[in-house]
Amino acid sequence: MQQKNKNPWRNILRGYYEMRKTLADDASRMALNEFLENFQRQGSVNANGLFIPWKATGGG
């Protein structure tokens, strides 16, 4: 009778390598979404979740 290997590291490493393949694409997509949301809100949100509006400029 063959005993099953209960060590999960092989599956964890496989998942890690799959995640590393898409990490740069995922990070750039998140940065682009944040950038676009800041323009829609006309400001940004800090780490505490508080909205910080942009200062008005003198241009027209």
Image (cartoon, grey):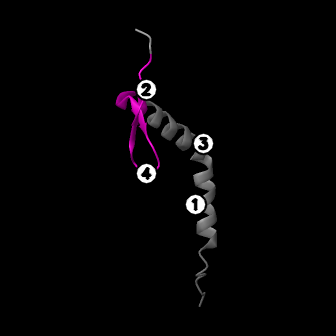
Closer to the eye: label 4 or 3: 4
For marks 1 and 3 on the same chain, the one whose residue lies earlier in the sequence: 1
- The x, y position of residue 14, in whole percent, is 61, 61
The secondary element bearing badge 1 is classed as helix
Q: Amino acid at mark 3?
A: Ala
Q: Nearer the viewer, residue 24 or 35?
A: 35
Could you tell which of marks 2 and 1 lies nearer the N-terminus? 1
Q: Which mark is residue 24?
A: 3
Find residue 55 and name its label. 2
Task: Give the labeled residue for mark 1.
Answer: 15
9 in relation to 25, above or below: below
Q: CA distance from mark 1 to mark 4?
A: 31 Å
The secondary structure type at the circle numbered 2 is loop
Q: How many marks?
A: 4
31 displayed left or right of 21: left
Residue at the bottom extreme?
A: 1
**Among the 4 quarters of the image, the one containing residue 24:** top right
* Residue 58 x, y percent position in the rendering: 44, 13
